[in-house]
Amino acid sequence: SAHPRAAQRQAYFRGELEQFLLTAWRERRDPTEPRGSYAGAMGLGQFMPSSIEKWAVDFDGDGRVDLFHSAQDAIGSVANYLRAHGWQAGQPVWYAPMFSSLGVDLATLLAPDILPTFSAADMVHHGVIPQGGMQHPGLLALVELKNGNNPPSYIVGTQNFYAITRYNWSSYYALAVYELGQEVAAARTGT
């Protein structure tokens, strides 16, 4: 109760429990059977009950959504979630920034946090060149990644980076997911 957002958190988790129980009742499943995280995320994709209701799909075509045992349903559901949150197929996730020797307006560029707000030209105007991203068709965000006592790292995030952060709000998570995906793709293709 001492948490600054205690009331919002209670309402959120009460709603998630209600959604879970409604789904179990509708699907005639025993609500004591599924297992999830302490926060209520369940299945291979760790979806909250409201996310299951909104974005889970029967990707394997067997007539039911099974995020616990069907990798196809889990992968298809995560893809559906990302698409619903603005994923742009074929677009990069981030670009490396090059900082202008004339100075960088970090205050302006970091103010929107990770929300893509600036065109590539706007970024350049404020002192950051998105390497390889000058022709990027969408908006961009300068993302600061703090490194403890070391200087921060920066990336220029796209809408796709932002979409990953809708799945998990951590920029570090989004970057790790992207990098892991790149390694998996390289391993699959042998490159």
Image (tube, helix red, strand yellow):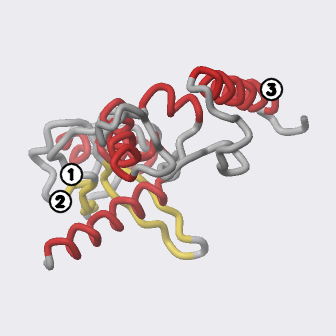
Is residue 109 in view from this perspective?
no
Between label 2 and label 3, give the one nearer the viewer: 3
Q: Amino acid at mark 2?
A: Gln
| Residue 42 vertical placement versus 180 (above, below) | above
Horizontal side of residue 154 vs 15, given as left or right: left
Q: Amino acid at mark 1?
A: Pro
Q: Are marks 2 and 3 in contact (CB under 8 Å)?
A: no
Looking at the rendered structure, the number of numbered marks drawn on it comes to 3
Horizontal side of residue 118 vs 4, given as left or right: left
Q: Nearer the viewer, residue 30 or 22?
A: 30
Q: Earlier in the sequence, mark 1 or mark 2?
A: 1
Q: Amino acid at mark 3?
A: Ala
Q: Residue 81: image x %, image y %?
A: 38, 36
Q: Are marks 1 and 2 in contact (CB under 8 Å)?
A: no
Q: Quadrant of the N terminus?
A: top right
Q: Nearer the viewer, residue 140 or 67?
A: 67
Q: Nearer the viewer, residue 178 or 130?
A: 178
Tell me the element at label 1.
loop
Looking at the rendering, which quadrant does residue 30 occupy? Answer: top right
Q: Which residue is mark 2?
A: 131
Tell me the element at label 3.
helix
Q: Which residue is mark 3?
A: 7
Q: Earlier in the sequence, mark 3 or mark 1?
A: 3
Q: Which mark is residue 92?
A: 1
Q: Residue 111: image x %, image y %?
A: 47, 40
| Residue 11 vertical placement versus 70 (above, below) | above
Q: Earlier in the sequence, mark 2 or mark 3?
A: 3
Tell me the element at label 2.
strand
Please report the residue visible at 18 percent of the width from the left and 46 percent of the height from the top.
91
Q: Quadrant of the C terminus?
A: bottom left
**Pointer 3: residues within 10 angstroms few (<14), some, or many (20+)?**
few
Q: Which residue of the protein is positioned furthest toward the bottom in this rendering?
A: 190
